[in-house]
């Protein structure tokens, strides 16, 4: 018997298993391709020969596989062995998938916690690795010490879907930044400006713009997007046309920037020209508009 089982030894699962081992926990591991367990075995992990053996080896089962279907494929045939154990699923998925997985695990007598890893593998085990959790609070309290080996834990609530909701929303913000960065680098690159020369300016500009976000949160929560507006939507929509035109002139694709223009135009058409950009959030909630 061991204290923790880790199922899935890709880049992330390996980092998770290593972090548990580094904190002195006894760890059983399983991976579809057994070769990936060898390095961990050399560090003291017990290698299970089957998923069932892996599940039966520990009271705490951490899964980190590619997608939820993979988790169901791996755990489905050994569902009976889950009874009385806690499953912490750190596979990336949607809130709906997490709730379904939670119901399924509970129906087989297990406690279920879903998780979202806001880190890349080298960060695991350090304080900057933020891991979001949701699901059974009782189970989370019981294993929060062990989970603390992975990084900084944040428990969000009983609804198993909360961790993936926060995870996906944080990733959405990240991809927005990545999309803008790619466009900016394509535009400057087309003019022969090296990325290394432009990047410091972009990084500090993005950091400065982060300063606007707390006010956005207040505006969205209060519903008042018109007080103390210094950069109104109408002005920004007119200036945004230049982003599109400059990309086209430089023979740079506009596929990343056109959707934002479309939303801004909808905002102006809805009479929000004098409001702040934060007012556009409401237009994204289609069900609120009967769409
Ligand atoms: N890497 C990151 O930066 C990062 C960050 C946050 C969250 N995540 C999430 O963590 C999870 C794992 O990511 P990763 O980076 O470890 O991915 P990865 O390196 O591609 O590993 C994928 C894992 O899933 C297993 N797998 C895939 N298909 C399978 C199947 N049909 N049956 C059984 N096992 C299967 C692989 O087994 P084999 O070794 O046999 O192929 C491997 O253990 C994903 O949900 C990912 O979104 C990753």
Image (cartoon, helix red, strand yellow):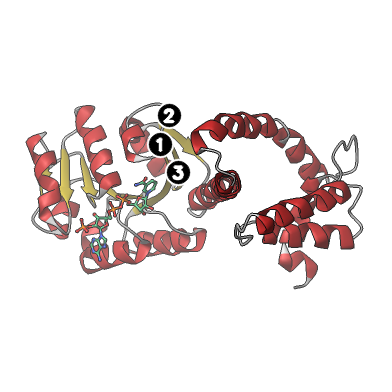
Query: Percent position (x, y) of residue 169?
Result: 57, 50
Does mark 3's beta carbon lie closer than 8 Å to ligand 1? no
State the mark number for residue 128.
Answer: 2
Query: Image point 40% across, 26% down: which residue?
Result: 127
Disc 2 secondary structure class: loop
Sequence-first disc among 3 and 1: 3
* Label 1 crowd (10 A; few <14 / some 14-19 / many >=20): few
Position of 189 compared to 227: left or right?
A: left
Q: CA distance from mark 3 to mark 2?
A: 16 Å
Query: Residue 249 appears in which quarter of the rendering?
Result: bottom right
Q: Depth check: give the residue in front, 271 or 225.
A: 271
Which numbered disc, 3 or 1, marks the residue closer to the eye?
Answer: 3
Q: Earlier in the sequence, mark 1 or mark 2?
A: 2
Q: Is 136 drawn above or below residue 256 in the view shown?
A: above
Calculate the distance from the C-alpha at mark 1 to the C-alpha at mark 2. Answer: 21 Å
Q: Nearer the viewer, mark 3 or mark 2?
A: 2
The residue pinned by badge 3 equals 133
Frontmost residue, 201 versus 262? 201
**Which label was assigned to residue 141?**
1
The single residue placed furthest to the front in the displayed view is 192
Label 1, secondary structure: give it.
helix
Nearer to me, 284 or 188: 188
Quadrant for the C terminus, please.
Answer: bottom right
Instruction: Look at the numbered disc 3 and give the secondary structure of its residue.
Output: strand
């Amino acid at each position: 018997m061991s204290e923790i089982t880790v199922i899935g030894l890709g880049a992330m699962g390996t980092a998770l298993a290593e972090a548990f081992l580094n904190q002195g926990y006894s760890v059983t591991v399983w991976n579809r391709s057994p070769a990936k367990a060898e390095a961990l075995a050399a560090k003291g992990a017990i290698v299970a020969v089957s998923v069932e053996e892996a599940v039966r080896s520990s009271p705490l089962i951490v899964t980190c596989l590619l997608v939820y279907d993979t988790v169901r494929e791996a755990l489905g045939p050994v569902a009976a062995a889950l009874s009385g154990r806690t499953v912490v699923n750190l596979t990336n998925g949607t809130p709906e998938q997490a709730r379904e997985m939670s119901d399924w695990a509970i129906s087989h007598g297990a406690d279920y916690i879903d998780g979202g890893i806001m880190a890349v593998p080298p960060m695991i085990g350090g304080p900057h690795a933020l891991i979001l959790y949701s699901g059974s609070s009782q189970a989370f309290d019981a294993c929060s010490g062990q989970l603390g080996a992975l990084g900084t834990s944040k428990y969000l609530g009983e609804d198993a879907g909360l961790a993936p909701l926060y995870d996906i929303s944080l990733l959405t913000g990240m991809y927005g930044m990545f999309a803008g960065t790619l466009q900016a680098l394509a535009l400057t690159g087309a003019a022969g400006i090296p990325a290394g020369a432009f990047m410091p300016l972009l990084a500090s500009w993005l950091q400065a713009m982060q300063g606007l976000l707390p006010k956005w949160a207040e505006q969205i929560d209060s519903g008042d997007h018109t007080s103390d507006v210094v950069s109104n939507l109408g002005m920004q929509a007119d200036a945004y046309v230049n982003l599109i035109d400059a990309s086209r002139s430089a023979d740079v694709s506009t596929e990343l920037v056109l959707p934002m223009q479309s939303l801004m135009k909808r905002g102006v058409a809805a009479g929000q020209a004098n409001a702040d950009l934060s007012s556009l959030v409401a237009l994204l909630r289609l069900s609120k508009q009967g769409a």
